Amino acid sequence: MEVAPLDEPVTAPKTASSFAIPFPSTPQKKMPRSSERILLRVPVVIYGYAGKSGAFHEDTETILVNSSGALVTLKAKLALGDTVFLIHKSGGEEQEVRVVYLDPYSDRETRVGLAFKQPVSGFWKKTRKKPRVPKTFRVIVKGTDPKGHPFAQSAYTVDLSEDGARLDGIGFLTSPGQTIEVRRLWRKARFRVVWIGQVGTTESNQVGVVLQSEKNIWRVEVPRAAAKPSKK
């Protein structure tokens, strides 16, 4: 009875091939190659609201991808038309996506087709935008826990980039998108959480953060991203 609503699209086998096309009226000719589906496993984070279940945050991998979206497997029970957020875990890029396809893959999991608002060329080929270097600094992190209570705790950096960092030892954060304050010595800056390590893995209690201002609190030499060759 719990998966009955997902059986509604009786033509699922036919629509599966077009799971990532957000709008049926979109002309196929405008994106002849960018919408080609390929088998590609990309670590992603999906978060948002799942109806009566409330907020959720789930680490998963893509099954199929194209420039218009992806097919993933989720335990969260979503409905057609739901809007959630997808984070490319390697590159840190985030996109708002819409649920356009559902397939009851098993009793516990559902294959979900997610579509971008508009096609994003090269999204799945993105690697980490800025080089990271291993560096350990003791920091103080301030933020708000899931119940709305402020917290302040000690943590430390694992690695740094020009505009972000990976922090370890943080147990109060449960979903990406939050803004936290990170203080090292007398310097502090605000960062946005873009991913959270999955419990039970080596990344448990780790978070990836992106700087929200131009302020550099690390005062260390960090490699800059290679400049893109100019088009002539």
Image (spheres, rainbow, N blue to C red):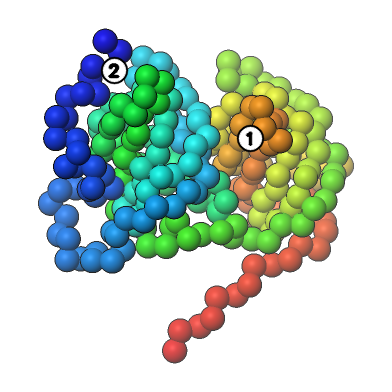
Marks 1/2: CA–CA distance:
29 Å
Q: Nearer the viewer, residue 205 or 194?
A: 205
Circle 1 SS class = loop
Circle 2 SS class = loop
Amino acid beneath label 1: Gly
* Residue at 64%, 67% in the rendered image: 225
* Residue at 28%, 59% in the rendered image: 35
Question: Disc 1 marks which residue?
Answer: 197
Q: Quadrant of residue 227?
A: bottom right
Counting every numbered tag in the picture gives 2
Looking at the image, residue 185 lies above or below residue 127 = above
The N terminus lies in which quarter of the figure?
top left
Q: Nearer the viewer, residue 172 or 201?
A: 201
The disc at residue 3 is 2
Residue 223, x across and y down, in percent: 73, 66
Left or right of 157? Residue 122 is left
Amino acid beneath label 2: Val
